[in-house]
Amino acid sequence: MKPLELLPQRGFPARSLMDNAAVTALLSTFPMFLVCPWSLLLNTDMGWSWSNWKMWWSHDPFLQEVVRFSLWCRGITFFMQVAFNQLIPDHNADAFSPPRLGPNTLGDNIVELLFGGLGRWDAEHFLFIAEHGYVYEHNMAFFPLLPLLIGGLAQGPLLPLAGLLRLRSRLLISSAFLNCVCSTLAAVSLYLLGCVTLQSRRSAFLSALLFCMSPVSIFMASTYSESLYVLATFAGLWQLQKHRTICSSAFLSLATAARSNGLVNAGFLLHSTVKEAIQRKNYSGKLLQTIFGIVLIILPFVLFQCFCFVRSCLESDENQQIPQELVQLAIEKGYRVHKTHIPAWCSLRFPLAYSHIQSEYWDVGLFRYFKLQQLPNFLLASPVMILSICTILEYTSSNLELCRTLGLWKVQSKYTNGFYGPHVFVYVAHLAALTGFGFLCMHVQVLTRLLFSSCPVLYWFCSHVIHKNEPWILGLKRGKTVSNPALQLLLAWTSLQQGTRIILAYFFGYWVIGTALHVNFLPWT
């Protein structure tokens, strides 16, 4: 951290994220974006009325099992984090740990006992932003959608509990509820996306079940933006596969409001439009929709960077003061508080706070992580690297001609559906881009949660391998209820092929070990 300059001892002008006028003005579109995709999705003109949803639910036992299994897995994750948090002492990590303002009540102590493990590492940033706003410069690395939503829940439906629970406790409860709902809906979205893309409901079904017990399950439960991001991404891609560009763009815009890597999703719209132009399918109206869609996807990033610029470079002082405890933390840790001085990045031609903060505070950049002391983190990320490489090689080796044409032209192929189908190409390309960028430029251990919260093709490949190794699971009985192939695989562990065992061991191992380490401030992904 840079040393704090010109920090007055009496405090600083500051605002809560929910109260700041500049934030409200710049980010006022986010709630609209949150409602817009679902209102479009449920519009009767598009065939998605509430009655149709109920009919679909009652006639699709696969969908029902996905929801049930997701809720079970979220419950197991919750109870594991409670147990591990009590059994294992917290590691004294060099992580952001702001002081708790105000006395604890009995209710706060109970909430900390049950939900405290969900507020570790980066979760501290999201909780802090929701409670105090963007006080420190490095807080601006975390995008505002999650803090806005959990802040709205804590200050809205949970406000009657204010006499029993302080704001941070209500934020923890809000994030646990929100992420449970989002991760379950994300599993449903992955199932629906797989049905359309793979043209195989059983493959889509197993993929969604694997998502429910993914190696990054603890991040789907903690106060991280992964659940929100993966829901918006998978739902947007599903709508894009259904050729609903505007609805897709609204969802993908939400993804960008949650995480910066949502910008990459604009490539899906661009690829779809170029493909339709080359194949001359409904191109006339598609171009304008795509331009509007790409602008919509980029807009949250631009708005947030404008807010950061105004906040750091232009904004005038106000009367409201930062609590003295937070000022003292800034002095002790060397955190840069806004308006202490004008940062150097404000004078750049493209003054992007995000790239500056990632570079200066987290040392993110090309080859910067290639150090001997980071070898354990490369080992930690090696399973997802191997899985990604295997996914890419398996698909490209079976679709050489399709890959040479970048999936834009029709080619003769013996594969029309499933993992090798032509619609899967763009997802493989997306995986390759994120894998390469993450390995070369990011903290490599983050690659696990980056890929498993962004790339549906990883789940499709694992489902493909398991179906190939264990063809007997295709014959599981189906009636009003369905057999859960994930559970059946576990029960038949001793008879499984080695490849299936490796995949399941990886998923369950990272799920359990990751939960134990993460909730105790031990290094994980």
Image (spheres, rainbow, N blue to C red):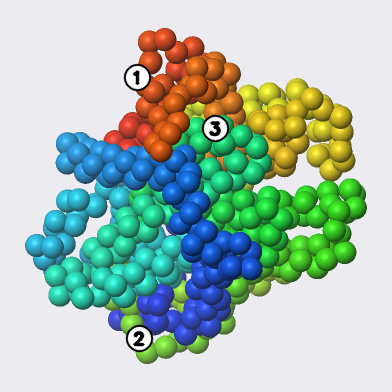
Residue beneath the point at 60% across and 73% down: 303
**Which one is earlier in the sequence, the residue at label 3 or at label 2?**
3
Q: Residues within 10 Å of mark 1 (few under 14, many from 20)?
A: few
Circle 2 residue: 320
Q: Position of residue 189 (x, y in %)?
A: 53, 49
The disc labelled 2 sits on which kind of residue?
A: Gln
Q: Is residue 405 visible?
A: yes
Q: Residue at x 63, y 64 (%)?
A: 46
Q: Quadrant of residue 287?
A: bottom right
The mark lying in front, picked from 1 and 2, is 1
User: Is residue 455 visible in the rendered structure shown here?
Assistant: no
Task: Give coordinates of residue 44: x percent, y percent.
Answer: 59, 68
Q: Residue flagged by tag 3: what amino acid is it?
A: Arg
Q: Residue beneath label 3, please?
A: 202
| Outermost residue toward the bottom in this view | 319
Tag 3 and tag 1, C-beta contact below 8 Å: no
How far apart are the two marked residues, 1 and 2, measured between alpha carbons?
60 Å
Residue 491 has which mark?
1
Quarter of the image with the N terminus is: bottom left
Return the mark for residue 473: none
Q: Nearer the viewer, residue 60 or 259?
A: 60
- SS label for mark 2: loop
What residue is rendered at 50% in x and 73% in y?
Answer: 31
- Give amino acid for label 1: Leu
Determine the CA span between mark 3 and mark 1. Answer: 19 Å
Q: Secondary structure at mark 3?
A: helix
Number of marks: 3
Which of pointers 1 and 2 lies earlier in the amino acid sequence?
2
Do residues under tags 3 and 2 come within 8 Å of each other at their CB atoms? no
Question: 31 above or below 206?
Answer: below
Give the residue furthest to the left: 106
